[in-house]
Image (cartoon, rainbow, N blue to C red):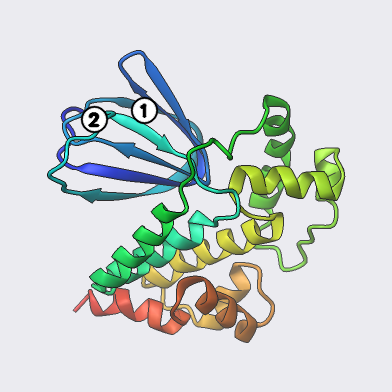
Amino acid sequence: MSGRKNHGFIIKLKGETEYFIGDKTWLLAPGQVLFVEKGSSYYIREVTPGYSYVVNFEASECFKHDMEKLPIKTSTDIGSYAEKLFCCWQKENVYGALSWLYSLLEKTSRSDTNYISKRDRQLLEPTVEYIDNHLMDQEFSLENLSEISGVSDVYLRRVFKRKYGLSPAGYVTKERIRLACMMLADGNGKSISEIASEVGYKDSLYFSRVFKKSMGVSPTEYRSIYTDDLF
C-alpha cells in the first residue's frame, strides 16, 4: 500500500497478518483492530490464511500514529459486531452501520488484553485447524478439543477466548454463519435447508434462529440484499 487514500480500521476476523511500516511491525490476529492513517505507506505478509473487514473514512484531524493496534476487551465478539456492521452497510443503513462501528470502538481498552504466549498460540493451532476442517460436519463435537490441544477444557476455553474473543462453540457458530453468508450471496439457488445442512446444521429452523441472532436479519432477508443488487 503506497500513500493510502483514506484513514481506515482493519478488523481482523480470521487468520493472522503482519503489517510493516518503517522499522515497526504489527501482527494482527482475530479479535484485533488496526488503525491506519491516510497517506501512510506499508506492506503486509499473510501469516495464516484468513479475512478482515476494512472500514475506510475521512477525518479532518491529524492522528498521532501512522498505524496503531487498538486492543479490544476480551469479552467483545468483534466478529459479530463487524458482521452486523457489514450487513447494515449492504442494506444502505448508514446509521445502523455507524452505530455498530461506534459500539465496537467503544469496546477498545488501553491495555493489550489479547496477548497470549507463544506456547498458548502453538497449542491453539491444531485445535483451530481441526475445527475449520470439520465445520460442515453435522456430527462435529467439541468434546475432544481438549485432547487435541493437550490441555483441560477450562484452560482451552480461557486461552481461546483471550485470542479470539469467543469460546470454541462461539467460534464454530461464527464460522458457520460466515460460510452461510457466502452461500446465500453467491446466487447458487440452494434452499435455506440445503445451506443449513452444508454448514453443519441438521435443523434448518434452528439454523435460521442462529443466523438471525448473529446477523440481525433472517437468511432469506440476507439473500434478498444481494438478489436486489442483481436487477
Image coordinates of residue 209 in percent, x first then y, are 58, 82
Residue 217 horizontal side relative to residue 133, left or right: left
Image coordinates of residue 19 in percent, x first then y, are 38, 27
Q: Say the numbered circle drawn on residue 1.
A: 2
- Residue occupying image coordinates x 40% and y 52%: 105
Question: Which quarter shows the C terminus?
Answer: bottom left
Image coordinates of residue 54 in percent, x first then y, are 32, 48
Q: Residue furthest bottom?
A: 205
The disc, 2 or 1, on the residue closer to the chain's N-terminal end is 2
Of 103 and 55, nearer the camera is 103
Q: Secondary structure at mark 2?
A: loop
Q: Residue furthest front?
A: 110
- Residue occupying image coordinates x 43% and y 72%: 184
Q: Quadrant of residue 88?
A: bottom left
The amino acid sitting under disc 2 is: Met
The amino acid sitting under disc 1 is: Ile
Proximity of marks 2 and 1: CB atoms separated by less than 8 Å: yes
169 up-or-down from 129: above or below: below
Image coordinates of residue 130 in percent, x first then y, are 71, 47
Q: Say the numbered circle drawn on residue 44.
A: 1
- Residue occupying image coordinates x 59% and y 76%: 210
